[in-house]
Image (cartoon, rainbow, N blue to C red):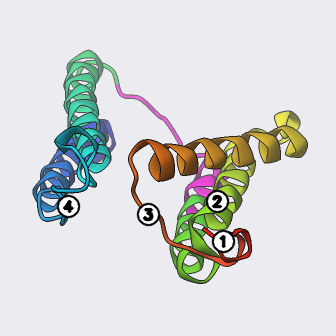
Amino acid sequence: MKMKKYRDVALGGITLVVSVLYLFYTQQIKTRPKLTPEYANARIIPWLLGIALAVLSVFLIAKGIRDVKKTDSEESGEKIEKTDLAAVVLTFVVIIAYITLMQPLGFCLSTALYLFFQMLVLAPVEKRKPLLFAGMSVGCTVLTCVAFRIGLQQLLPRGMIESLMGF
């Protein structure tokens, strides 16, 4: 038996375990209960993301089980293309660069750069639009910063841009 047909079930199971661990550690985040209401503390966004990850993991497991049942009688000869493999490797490189650059550059600049390069990696070559990707990256980063800074009253890692603007 090939393990390829069980990859969605295995990945869903691993992701479900990671999401449960993530939710456990979310509860360890320190909050300032006297300064912020319960619905807007530092745990809420990570908690919502953990719940979403767990739900999507269950969906992936269910899809994997359905696909295994469907392909039991037929053998699929899927091959992983080199472009798909390159996209996966480049995604890991971009994520590692994002994590590495967060401290010196701060949240705003590193997130905008991460989003831009991740869009370039994932978009097909014929549909790459750098100006659109740059605008979307900056727009999403600004919305996220405003949501955390003003809406949730939470601080984000500061960098060069925040220091120059006095945040």
Q: Residue 121, how many percent across, how many down?
A: 70, 52
Q: Residue 147, how many percent across, how many down?
A: 49, 43
Q: Local crowd at mark 4 within 10 Å, few (<14), some, or many (≥20)?
A: some
The residue under the point 46% across, 50% down is 148
Amino acid marked by disc 1: Gly
Establish if 162 lies above or below 35: below
Closer to the chain start, of discs 4 and 1, is: 4
Label 4 residue SS: loop
Q: Are marks 2 and 3 in contact (CB under 8 Å)?
A: no
Closer to the chain start, of discs 2 and 3, is: 2
Nearer the observer, disc 1 or disc 2? 1
Q: Residue 108, how many percent across, how many down?
A: 63, 61
In this picture, which residue range is highlighted in magenta?
Answer: 75-89
Nearer the observer, disc 2 or disc 4? 4
What residue would you read off at disc 4?
A: 31
Amino acid marked by disc 4: Thr
| Residue 2 visible to the viewer | no
Closer to the chain start, of discs 1 and 3, is: 3
Establish if 153 lies above or below 127: below
What residue would you read off at disc 2?
A: 114
Distance from Cα at disc 4 to Cα at disc 1? 24 Å
Amino acid marked by disc 2: Tyr
